Structures are given as structure tokens and as C-alpha cells.
Image (cartoon, coloured by chain):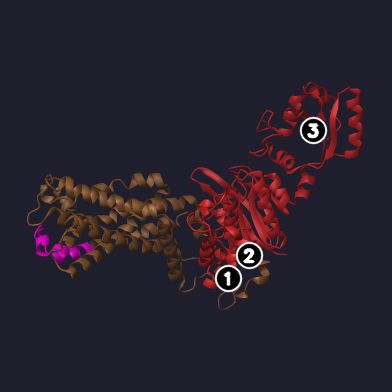
Chain colours: A brown, B red
Amino acid sequence: MSSATTTPSVERARTIDAHGEVSNRLPRNAWLVDALVIAGRNLKDLRRTPQLIVFSVVQTVMFLLLFRYVFGGSIEIPGLSYVNFIVCGFMAQIAIFDGFGVAIAMAEDSKSGLIDRFRALPMARSAVVGGRAAADLLRQAGLVLIVIGVGFLIGFTVEGSVLGVIAAVGLCVVWGFAMFWVFAAVGLFVRDSETAQAATTPFFILVFVSSSVILVDTLPGWLQPFARNQPLTQVCNAVRGLVEGDAGAALSPGTTGHYVIISLIWCAGITAVFAPIAIYAYRRP
Amino acid sequence: MSAIVEVEGITRSFGETRALGGVDLEVQEGSVLALLGPNGAGKTTLVRILSTLIPPDGGHARVAGFDVEKEPIAVRRCIGTAGQFAAVDEVLTGRENLEMVGRLSRLSKRDAKVRAQEVLERVSLADDADRPLKTYSGGMRRRIDLGAGLVARPRVLLLDEPTTGLDPANRLDLWAYLRDLVNEGATVLLTTQYLEEADQLARDVAVIDHGQVIAQGTPVELKQRFAGDVLDVTLASSADLERAAAALDGVGTETPRIERGVVKVTVPVANGVDALVDAVRRLDEAAVTVADLGLRRPSLDDVFLALTGHTTDNSDGVDGADPPPTPDTPGVASTAEEATR
């Protein structure tokens, strides 16, 4: 039945290159095709499991409301309302909260054997992780926009320029791309969703010992050097400067330009280190 | 006919555990080889090496003429895989899963669509093609997994325990699909713990135990080489088992073996018809009431027992009532001796 209806090109396309032999090399467009196919798969998964998006949105919004209304009264930010302060912080945090899900999803794929199937196909090796990264960027951009939208409902205002807001969203997505590789590496190494969940818990330290929801100056002295110099703080400071203009920039010692550049350097560094680790973890038997 | 899978002296260890200790194997193009062995024999390790998922520690393996270590992409272009863990995306539909695998196997968008439809019909899932996989039953999931292995029309199909964990009805069902493939001339290497499965599907069987191939041949050859005909005597009462076994001692090539659970005495015999006549006479003299008596061709179970001294792990039923044979003595003799005393 099947042999009668298949076009002869099916067999040729799979195995035979221009010289009529099975090639040990992939065609030049293979990476792009594979990454798009994988990204498409991950977006379909996302669309058909709306509970996943709903929960991550509910969680983000809930925390935003809790911080706004529970801590908002007792935390004084000089020159800026607390709601303006934390909406910027939450925009930068998305990269990490979203990453928890990335680690778990990667671990599940590894465990289910799906990654083994991919590894036995003549496809570009880095495309499985790269394709998911692409799908994840869209998801993160969506979450950042939701944070801004909910922020407007609870009194968030933009003191800077619209261009600044656009740049801030862009920076958050670049930062999310860098952190994606960290979480993908964790998930692909542990290969078990429960272990992945446990292994990502320390990242809460990164979230809270930063300038995302408080001013670093209010921390105990011994915590301040870490809080001041870790990457999330650089991104938070950059986002505040971009979104809230001078009022945001005045909260930290450096200029907005300084924090944007330092943030981008961190993103490049993290990607350079963790992308190869994640791809190695994927290829590892 | 030429060998399309060639395995030479493959070794592989995981830490201290030696999974494969020098395996040699060939699969001829257009044939089906069943790799038969118990859990932990090294079957899955060998399939993973041939699928380019893990490298061997030593030795060489070639698939369709390509070295699995040096030319992995060429090997991947020639193989299709399916296994005991249905490796599919739960959220995608059956069709989307197959189209995805097709695209990732370097088919064009159009060809991937055409092939997906053909394969869906092939594994009788055309009517369920557009439902997400999480609504599929276990048997359907295995079929779509097998289908994913077929999409790219691979030259060699590597199946790791394709029916493990399926209920008998679904297993029979999957066998039918595999048998069709085989009849159309597909080259298949499949691993199985089920002797019956090897017997049903494969032209060649390699018996693997503790990381080594201990016998290879057609099911018929193996049966002739390692086990002759078997005389099966079912008794009316289990009280007669010892007496019947004693009476039958000397009829066959080995001492009779008691299968208490099914009230049976079995004995391998060289000359079936003579032995049958002899056995009837002896049982009559011993005044044992016989419920059923007959000659049967040996099953692969008998072969496996003769080769390894133990049955396969999942042999539930027939041998369940016997004490486990000690590893250093041939299982057949020891249990039977014990029984006849």
C-alpha cells in the first residue's frame, strides 16, 4: 500500500545527496529547519496546555499583587512609588521564574525517551535546545508584557520614555535567553523532573538577594557585595533606568547606560558558558 | 544477500558493570533478527550502540556500511527506531508526531505529510490521527511509536522490546503489523524477552545472556541443535508425578523433569515415535493414570533452558513450580534429578 503511493523523492530526500550517496553530512539548511520544527512543537505544546500558561501567569500576577499590597506599605523607595519599583523588578525576574519550567520540561523530554528519538535522527544536534530557546523567548516576552499590563491596573506609571520601555522589554528577553541555557543545562543533566525542581530552588536566592524587590542598601552588610554585583541586579537597575527615567536611575550608583552594558556583558558571558554545557548535556549518552 | 548490520567484538561497560562482553553479530538485508535474552542481558545496550546513542568501548559496528562511531549521521539516515518507552510527544496529535519526525529526518514538508498519512493507515491509526496522543491507549501509543520509526522508510528498523508491557491482545495486534513489514522485505533487528515473539517474527535468532551471544541460528536450527523432541505427559493426579517420572527414566536422552504446577512430566527424546511407544508401555506397567500424552517440538524456552541453565525471567506459568536451578549445574539435569529422587 505504502510503496505504491510514495513519491520516489521521499527516499532520495532522506538518504541521498547530490552525488547519489548517503552523506554523513547534513544539508546546510538543516539547523534552521530543525530549530523551526522544534520551536513549532514547543509552541503547540504551550498552546494546548493552557493550564501551564495560566498557572505561570497567575503565579506572577499573584506575587506582583502580594508585593504591591503587602510589602508596599512598609517599604519606602526614595523618589519612586513601590509599585513602579517592583513592576520593573518583576520584568527582570521573569527570566528566572520561567526558567524553572524550562528545566522541568527539558528533564521530562529526556526521561520520556523523546530526546533519544531526536538523537537517533539525522538532525542538527543543537537544534532541539535551540528550537526550544526560540519558543521560550516568545513565551517570556508575553509574560513581561503581562507584568506591564497588570502593573498599569495597580497603579504602575512610566516616568521615562516609551522607547525606554521597549528597550527594557528587549533587554529582559535577551536576559531570558541567557538564563534559558542555564536552566536547560540543569534539566538535561538531571533528566528527572523532580530532581530538576529541587536543583533549581537555589535560584530563589538570586531572585531575592538582588535589587528586584528591595533596595540593596537595606540588606545586611555581608550580603550587599553579592546582591550588588550579581547579574539580576544589573538587569533590574538597567530596566528601572530605562522605564522610570531619572527617578529610576537615581536609585543606584551607576548610570543607566552603564547597567545596560554590564547586563549585556553578563548575558553574553552566561550564554557563552552555558549554551555549550546545555548542548553537551543533550548530546551526552 | 549481504550483511546490512555488522557487529564485531563490541564491548561496553557502565562503571563496574559489563553490559556487553565482545558481541559478534550480523543481520542480512531483508531479514529479521531477534535478539533474545532476559532482562539485563545487554540487548538494549547493543541497540543503543547501533542507534548511535552511545559509543561502544571496543569493537566495531556498521549499519548499511557506515561506522556507527565515525559516520553517525549517515547511520541515522538509514535507521528507524522504536522502543519499549514510547518516545512520542503527548500533546501533539498522531499526525503531528509523524510529520515532525519526518521533517527531522530530512523529508520535505510535502513528503513528510504524504508519509505521515501512509504510515497512519499502515498502523491503523488514520481515524485517530488528529487526536492528541494523551487520549491514546497503550497499544495505540506503541503503534504510533512504531510508525515514527517507519516514516522515513529506513533501510534498517531497530526495535527495542517493541511489545514489552503490552497486554496479550495488543501484543498479537502489534505482531501482525510487524509480520506485514517483514513480509514486505524490511530489515529488522528486534530485541525481546519473549521466546514466542522471536519464534513468531524472526528468521534468525541470537540468544544473548550476560553480554554475550551464546547461540545463533534459525528457530528451527536452534531447536534441532539444542533440544530434540519433547515427550509431554500430563497426569490425572499430582500424586503420581514421582512414580511417572521414575517409570519414564531411560525413555529419553535426559532424566524426566517434573512440572508440578501443570501436573506434567516432560522428557527430551531422540527418536520420538519409539519413545512414545516405550513410554505408553512403561506408564501402563506403572499403573499411572494419564490425562494426556504427546510429542511436541521443543519451544525456544527449551532451547534457552538448555543453553543458559535458566529460563527467561518472565516465564510465568510452566516452570513456576520448579525450584530455581543452581547456576553451576545444568538446569535440566539438576531439577529433574532432584525430582526423581
Would you name the residue on which mark 1 appears? Answer: A15
Query: Disc 2: which chain?
Result: B
Residue B188 screen position, x and y as percent:
66, 58
Kind of residue at disc 1: Thr
Image point (62%, 59%), residue name = B157
Per the image, label 3 sits on a secondary structure element best described as strand
Would you name the residue on which mark 3 appears? Answer: B266
Image point (45%, 62%), residue name = A41
Q: Is residue B314 above or below residue A160?
A: above
Q: Is residue B203 above or below residue B113?
A: above
Circle on res. B155: 2
Image point (20%, 56%), residue name = A87
Q: Is residue A181 above or below residue B172?
A: below
- Quadrant in the rendering for residue B124: bottom right
Residue B78 screen position, x and y as percent:
59, 65
Same chain, marks 2 and 3? yes
Kind of residue at disc 3: Thr
Mark 2 surroundings: few (<14), some (14-19) or many (≥20) residues within 10 A? many
Query: Disc 1: which chain?
Result: A
- Quadrant in the rendering for residue B149: bottom right
CB within 8 Å, label 1 to label 2: yes
Kind of residue at disc 2: Arg
Residue closer to the observer: A87 or B315: A87
